[in-house]
Every structure is written in structure tokens, then in C-alpha cells.
Amino acid sequence: MAKTSSVEKNNRRRKLAGQYAAKRKALKDIVMDQSKPMEERFRAQLKLSALPRNSAKIRIRNRCEVTGRPRAYYRKLKVSRIALRDLGNNGQIPGLVKSSW
């Protein structure tokens, strides 16, 4: 099980990224638009850098829904390989068959 503080920190990042998503996108569009004047683009870049760092989507870490483990994460199932094995052995994942011979 991952540290509770790490999991909660990641949850705060998700919340913050959701709050600032529209504002970040608008500023990013201005910065990337080559037809806008350089001064306007620079002001937008300064505003973008003034936003909280944790509001960037890139700072969110994929973590297992069951254990909070940050590595060996299956995106489709949203669990780690260890949790997948445990759930599969218990028969809690429909359609998953454990092969052994």
C-alpha cells in the first residue's frame, strides 16, 4: 500500500488540474498562436507561469485504484500488476482467466 500522503497529494493535483484546465488552455492557445503580437504572447506566458505548478496535467501520476502503487500501472484497468493478479486470482475481474500449467 502506498503512503496515504502521496495518494492524497496526487488527488489534490487532479482537483487543481481540473480547476485550472480551461484557464491554462486559453493561455496556452495565445502563447502558441504565431499570428498574435509578441508582447501579447509574452504576457500570456507570464500569466501561465504564475499559475500553480500542480495545476499542470503533466504533474498527475497514474496510481493504482486499489493500492495506490505508482508503477506497473495498467491504464485500461486502472490497477497495478500486483492488484490485477490478486483480483484475478479471487475471480473479481470478469473475463480474466489465470493460465497455469
Image: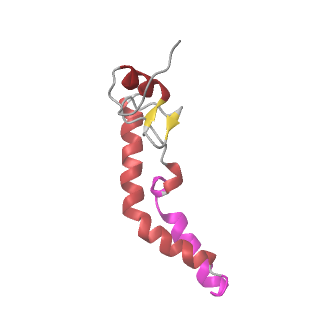
Q: Is residue 9 above or below residue 44?
A: above
Q: Would residue 64 be found to the left or right of residue 35 on screen?
A: left
Task: Identify the magenta region.
Answer: 34-55
**Residue at (42, 40) in percent of width and height:** 78
Question: Residue 84, position in %: x, y?
Answer: 43, 28
The x and y percentages for residue 49 are: 55, 64
Q: Position of residue 38 (x, y in %)?
A: 66, 83
The secondary structure making up most of the magenta span is helix
Kindly indicate the quadrant of the structure image that contains residue 63: top left
Total numbered badges shown on the rendered structure: 0
- Residue at point 62%, 75% (across, down): 32
Give left or right: position of 85 versus 48: left
Is 10 a magenta residue?
A: no
Of residues 61 and 75, the one nearer the viewer is: 75
**101 up-or-down from 82: above or below:** above
Q: State the image quarter where residue 31 is shown.
A: bottom right
The residue that appears at 43% across and 65% down in the rendered structure is 21
Q: Residue furthest top?
A: 101
Q: Residue, x 45% and y 57% (percent of image)?
A: 55
Q: Position of residue 28 (x, y in %)?
A: 55, 71
Give yes or no for residue 47 being in the magenta stretch: yes
Seen from this angle, which residue lies furthest front?
101
Does 26 appear above or below 83? below
